[in-house]
Each structure stands twice: as C-alpha cells, then as structure tokens.
Image (cartoon, rainbow, N blue to C red):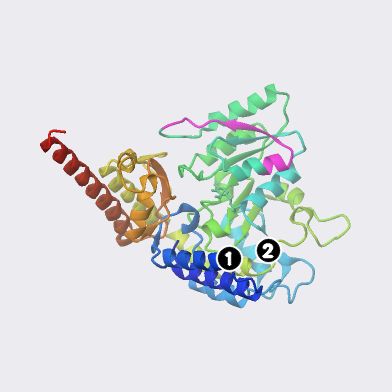
Amino acid sequence: MNSPGKYITFCLILAKYYTARGTIDMQMLENLEKFTRLKRDVAQINVDPLQRGGILTPEARAALVEWGDGYSICDFCAGMLDHIRNPPVEEFVHSILPEFLDIDEVRVTHGAREGKFAAMHSLCQKGDFVVMDGNAHYTSVLAAERAGLNVEYVPSSKEPDYAISSEGYALAIERAYEKKGNVTLALLTYPDGNYGNLADARAIADVCHDYGVPLLLNGAYSVGRMPVKARELGADIIVGSGHKSMAACGPVGVLGASEEYARIIFKPSATKKNKEVELLGCTVRGAPLITLMASFPTVVERVGRWPEELENARWFSSEMEKMDLVQVGDRPHNHDLMFFLTERLYDISQTAKGGRYFLYREMKDRGVCGIKPGLTRQFKLSTYGLGRPELEVVLNALSEIIESHEKDEKGDKNEKGANGS
Ligand SMILES: Cc1ncc(COP(=O)(O)O)c(C=O)c1O
C-alpha cells in the first residue's frame, strides 16, 4: 500500500475502540502492535492496477475531510441529487460529464457494477440474454445474474493474446438465438481487468447494432485514464469507476446512456415524481462525489497525457522482456495494465526462503508493492501515473532479486560440485 500512515491510524482507532468497550484484549493489542510494526516500513511505489487510478489528488484529499459528514452535499437539495446547484452537482452531471464521455445523459452511481446492473435491470427482461466478452469482470456476470439474465460469452483467442473479436460477438448472438434467446444487451470490457486488452469497440458496436442489440462499454479501467468517447466508439451505454480510474475515494462511478436508452434507464418513479427508480432516488450522497468533482480537472488533464502514459507502459514492458518476464495480451500494448508470465521468478520461489511469498517481501524491502502476495509465476501490474524514475525502481528491484537469487543458486551448485555431492 502507498501509505503506512493509514494502517497506523487504523490500529490506533481499533485500540481506542477496545479500550472504550472496557474489554482490552491483550492478545489483540499485541497483534495490533505487530501489525503496526509490520506496516511501518511499507513500500511507497504501488503498482496494483486496482489502485493506481484511484489515488486522490490533493484537492480531493482536502475535500474528503471537509465533506466527510453524512449527506454533506444535501444542504441545498430540492429533491433531486443530480440537480443540486450548490455544490455544482447539476453542472457536473448534466453538462460536464456528458461532454467528457460524449454521451447524452449521465448519472453518478456507486461504482461501475451498479451502473451495469441498472442498465441490465432496466433494459432487459428476466430470461433474456446478455452477450459479453470472455474477459469480462465478475461484476458484469453478477449484475446479469442479479437481473435474472442468461450470459452468452464471446470467448477470447486464448494464450498469449486473449483477444476479443467483433466476429465473436456475431457468433455469440447467433448461439443465443439458437437457444431461442432474446438478446437485449451486449457488453464489452474496455479494457479487461486481466490483460489490459482494448478490443475494437467500434467494430463490435457495429456488429451488435446490425442485430439491433445495444452495446454497454465497461470503462472501469479506461474512463478517467485515457480518452473515451462513447459516441465515437459506438457505445450506447457506458460505465466508469471513480475509485478505480477517476482519482476519487469512492464508492462512486458514472453511468452514461444515449437518449434512446437513457429514457428507460433513468425513468422517473410512478409515485415519487422526482426520483429515478433504477437509482433508488439518490445515489452518492456526500464525500465520494465531491472527491470525484474535486479531482476532475486533474483527471481531464491526465487523460490528455495518455500518449505519454502509453509510451511509459510500452517501455516498461520491453524492459521486463529483457529479463525474460513475458507480457501477454495486446502487443504492442495499448494500456497501462499489463499481465506478465514470470517463470523465472517462479523457479526462484521453488528454493527461496519464504517460497511463493519471497517476491512480495523482497519487492516491499525495495520500496515496491502491489504485486499480489504469493504470486510469482504470473502477475499483473499497472504503470499508470508513474514516471520513468519510479518505473526504474520497480525494474531494478526485479532485476536485483533475480540476479541475487540466481547467483546464490549457482554458488550452491558449484559448492555441491566441488564437494562431489
Ligand atoms: C474490469 C472491471 N470492471 C469493473 C470493476 C468493478 O468496478 P467498481 O468497483 O466501480 O464496481 C472492476 C473492479 O476490479 C474491474 O476490474
């Protein structure tokens, strides 16, 4: 994690809670102390794809404290959250975000998953089919399940590309028809959260439209990181994630729709006229929305720097490959999220002290975190927002770890050879 301070604060809060309860548990205090000590030396460069795009801007961090009270944005609400003028939620939701995403209507949600569910629940009938890419995030699958929908997958091309094709969408829709299914929505994960692959959304949208099926673009890893224009890509519905890619604390997300579908998704209640049913009236009612708004100018600016981000990601990938750590997925890569096959590190883990956890520990010792503890054979990471000097720290850490272990291994073998064993 990128801040040791937050763990220490958390430990102190817990200790205070137990003290207040009058049940000081010595074992618990001891564990907390151990935890604090463990975390004090926490790494500073975080390469976790899940977290890189959600790091707050200084403006959002200040706003978080100021607007932290419950319902803090509701002082001047006249009944519709998205029409609050002070703070300027209305302008943000009805003017700025539609322009940013290039789509007719936008609402704020609690996250990408809530947006996907709202779209599926309102546009599809129970028992319908949603066609989605084989690389789809589990939340897309759960949203469909919760809405009572069947899923027909578009399989990826498998290792090493894991590519998703527009022809695959046509075939999946045909398969659903063969099952006597009613296909009422297609979904593309753009990019997917495993390989960071950006499929040809425009071509996929065209195929779906030929069948009269609207396309939902899951931009959890793209909206707020790179330029994404729904109209240009042919997306009828788009979701983004504030805490993943828009420098917001969350939970917060955005849901956009073209006029035709917005009318259905954002339908007002029959009984509570100024409340939209799918959103249960009001969605994000305080700090997460304010952090999204506070970071927005920086987000717009960083989206404009995407070519630089991409160049860094590609450079990083090529440096990794010099160490035989092989990037899979799109090549050349088109996103900061990358997946590597790291057999060399796995081999080391077979004899290293600590086994599979050696990598996490040794990276942390060198100031890098975010590669999932216990992974050595393959892992994903993100270079988003990291400059070359920080990326060099990551690369040097990996290279040092590999060299030191392989040298030890060679030394051991030579020693055994010399001893005739
Ligand atoms: C590709 C993808 N889509 C959606 C989500 C969920 O986003 P949210 O937390 O905003 O619902 C994730 C989370 O990891 C993801 O990786």
Q: Residues within 10 Å of mark 2 (few under 14, many from 20)?
A: many
In the displayed image of the protein, which residue is found farthest to the front? 26
| Amino acid beneath label 1 | Leu
**What x and y, as percent, mark residue 404?**
23, 50
Q: Position of residue 343 (x, y in %)?
A: 33, 38
Examine the rendered structure and indicate whether residue 419 appears above or below residue 368: above
Residue that appears at 73% across and 24% down? 180
Q: Mark 1 points at which residue?
A: 292
Query: Where residue 11 is drawn, which disc sits there?
Result: none
- The reply to whether the magenta stretch includes residue 148 is yes
Foreground: 22 or 235?
22
Q: Which residue sits furthest right?
A: 271
Q: Which portion, as a residue range, is magenta? A: 143-159
The amino acid beneath tag 2 is: Val
In the image, is residue 326 above or below residue 299?
above
Q: What element carries label 1?
A: helix
The image quarter containing residue 111 is bottom right
User: Is residue 147 inside the magenta stretch?
Assistant: yes
Image point 66% across, 47% down: which residue? 116
Q: Are marks 1 and 2 in contact (CB under 8 Å)?
A: yes
Residue drawn at point x = 64 percent, y = 76 percent: 20
**Residue 373 seen in render:** yes
Residue that mark 2 sits on: 284
Taking the view exactly as shown, the residue that stands out farthest to the top is: 178
